Image (spheres, coloured by chain):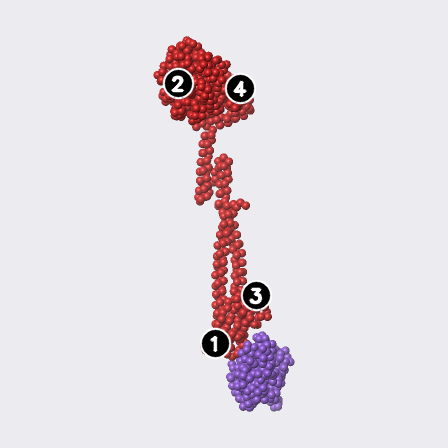
Amino acid sequence: MRLGLGAKFTLTVLIILAGTNAANTLYDLNASFRFHEQQLIERGRALGRLISLVSPEAILGFDFLTLNNYTREVSEQPDIVYSVITNPEGAVLSSYIDTTDPLAKKYLGQTESRDALKVLQKLEDRDELIKLQFPITHDGKLLGNFLVGLSREGLQSEFRQQLTIKMLVLAAVVVFLSLAIYAVFRFNILHPIQRLIAASRDVGRGQHAVVDVKSSDELGLLATAFNAMAEGIKREQAQLHRQANFDTLTGLPNRLMAFDRIDMEISRAKRSGQRFAVLFIDLDDFKSVNDSLGHPVGDRLLVAIGARLQAALREGDTVARLGGDEFLILASDIRSEMQVEKIADRVLEAVAEPQELNGRRVVAHCSIGIALYPDNGENAESLLANADNAMYQGKATQQGTATFFTEQMNIRLRKRVQMAQDLRVAIELGQLTLNFQPIVDTADRRHRGAEVLLRWTHPDRGAISPAEFIPLAEADGQIVDIGDWVLEQACRCWSSWRDAGIESGFLAINISRIQFRRRFSARLAELMSIYGVPPEALELEITESVLLDDHSQVAEELNSLRAVGVKLSLDDFGTGFSSLSYLKRFRFDVLKIDRSFIAGLPNNPDDVSLVKAILAMAKGLDLNVVAEGVETQEQLSFITAQSCEFAQGYLFARPSDEKTYRSYLENRHTGGEPVRRSANAT
Amino acid sequence: MRLALPLLWLIAATAAAPVVQAAEDPLVMGVFPRRNAVETAKLFTPMADYLSERLGREVKLVTSKNFDSFSRAVAEQRYDIVHYNQYHYIRSAKTYKVIAHNQEFGKDAVAGALFARRDSGITEVSQLRGRTIIFGGGKDAMLSYIAPRYLLMQAGLKEGDFKTEIAVTPENAVVALYYKQADAAGGGEVVLDQPAVKNAINVQELRLLATTEPLLFLPWAVKRTMPATLAGSIQSILLDLKNSEAGKQVLKSAIMTGIGKAGDSDYQPHRLITTAVFGAEGNAK
């Protein structure tokens, strides 16, 4: 049973009141009992002294009737059970037993009433009896004794009666006081507390509540404190609401609010039959701004772009920041796609407006994906996903453009998703294989090693290009397991060749940016140890994108790899975020010139200039250079003339599977054809 | 006419006689102090009032604080009417004439007696030799002392053959016996019937050892010098008490059942006993 505060308090007061008053009453009654007992004894003594005084004459005169009168008179006094006069030898001269006395009634039979000695003996040990004895003397001679028995029974009975009455009165007083205290407690304590509880529940339900402060006592202070707390909670809620719904950096609505706005717009559009557009905006290469100028500058750019977007839109349109470099625009009341295109153009222009940051002129661009309601989705999630998809696919084609969502995009998206799912089981099903493309010395065409290339043969779709599935694997993290598999397979191959006495040279293995982040150097060392692969047998190829990550971590991992002893190669140099500062900051052994630059040699002057510059820079930094995609003798001659040490391409050999490559290696040793062309292509 | 005047005077004098009598000295009625003065006055005031009314002359009740003062008053004949015990009368017979006697418990006479406790083993008076005997009311008490002494003498026990104790009243003597303060007690045969005794002790524990012949109860006497007509009137009034409702109330107040006629010869047995106990000179005190 749950006792309320009032019941507990009242019960406590009741117990205390009852306890203290009962104790007090018992003490008083006991004291009163003792007092009256003493009075009784004093009365008995007074009577005893009186009888002792008047009895000698009657004893001497054998006036037993007078003695009887004395004893009778004494016994008729209240609370006196018996009075007896004896001679010095103890023989009874006169006695009177008050058979009406409660004590005598309790312990004596009627027949015993005249036998004084038996009566005295029978009452001897009764606690209720007070026995007094007084000598009767005359001229110093003992004539006898006066014995009187006083009964406490009457006092005890009175005590019990008084106790009963007082306890009843006490119970009534305690009940009355308890009720009164409960009433006061209920009015002064419980009611304010109940108001506080009700207000607390309101606050708990998210409602703002204030209680009236009616007193200056502790409850008044509590109510004041509660109101202050409620105000604080209100402020906190407002702040939380703002934090939950608005982007703290730009002050724009955040993703959550954007969804709410879209939902609201959907409701409104359903009622009005109007259309609206969701524009998903992603800044192009924003990371490079952060990396090159620092995050504070990047943040300022985001704030500036947010403000520009707001300025570029109509009143009533919504701009939200979804996170990172992603923005969303909710454009209401759209009547045509052309109207949306105009909005998108204004956005592209607004974003591309140069911005002065930290004394540097920064120009940002963005890609936009557009989804229309109700054409491209009937809820916020689908609209946003489709706009995102449109942006993604548009950006994949060309950055800095606005792309309307189409159903084909969804089909492509579904394909991607299916491909990602198929890729998850590709290793287990043995669908992934390694290909090897030799790398040769340009001076004498001698075999130096090979680049390890991953191939996926899908059971339905056949061979799938790494350019198609590697980004998928990187996007959902599968690249870690796949990369590990590639690394182990490469080590296994190299080890088997060595065990077979085949001099295979080094293996250049591509390492993903995602793999690199996981700091795989320890795993590499473990595999090298397992398969007995020496460091010089491995060369790790990483792209410039790896270097865009946290520099200290990159440097640390590169140092770890160097400690393992493997060579490091910077792949696809010139195609990405090529920065000379990277080459200066991070020490590499090899630089690989992307095939796109080799393809224009030796006729394309831009490619010629670029390749010459790269080779000159590499020489200056003491780096070996591998030219990728060498397919013609002219290209080989050019790079050889420019002192490019190594080359790789169809001119020397196409990528081949393990078995073919092993044959190639064995034939090379035995003087056979160095290259056997493979159907697989990179 | 000359004869008429003396006749008228005689008639007037005769008519005025009660007035003259009322103016006489009141008659003094003395009652012996066997009870205390207050109780005595309470018991006999109705008797005095009744006599006053019937005699047409005030009867004044006089109590005595003790037997000595009472005996002196008797000896000095200060009482016109006196109520005392038989021995008192015998001693005052020369100056007082007995005219009536008490009737108590419906009896005219009562025997003197000796009592012992049933558990004492005493069944014969002769066994009291050397024992303590308690008597009540003093040595003048006819039934409580003189008559028991007479019984002792009859059994051959003279004074000195037993130890004598005296209780203030006959009732106390038997109560004292009950409480074993003596081996025997003397008293009137009816003492055990007294309410005071019956209420105080269990009389069944006492035994009657011996009794005298019945002796006429306490006497009422008048001075021998009292005119015979007045003495006769008093006697008549006393004897007539039991015949009227008012008289019965007087008797009841005095704890009597009636008053009978008595003469000196009626107390001759008493005289013989007192003479036997005290000798002839004892009756002359």
First reached walking from the N terminus: tag 1 or tag 4: 1
Residue B93 appears in the rendering: no
Q: CA distance from mark 3 to mark 2?
A: 126 Å
* Badge 1 element: strand
**Residue on which disc 1 sits:** A142
Mark 1 neighbour density, 10 Å: few (under 14) some (14–19) many (20 or more): few
The label shown at residue A458 is: 4
Q: Which residue is mark 2?
A: A590
Looking at the image, which is closer to me, A555 or B86? A555
Q: Amino acid at mark 2?
A: Val
Chain drawn in red: A
Q: Nearer the viewer, residue A392 or B165?
A: A392
Which chain is indicated by disc 4?
Answer: A
Q: Mark 1 vs mark 3: same chain?
A: yes
Q: Earlier in the sequence, mark 1 or mark 3?
A: 3
| Amino acid at the residue labelled 1 | Leu
Q: Chain of mark 2?
A: A
Among the two numbered marks 2 and 1 on one chain, the one whose residue lies closer to the N terminus: 1
Residue at the limit of the structure toward the left, as seen here: A620
Q: Secondary structure at mark 3?
A: helix
For mark 1, name the chain.
A
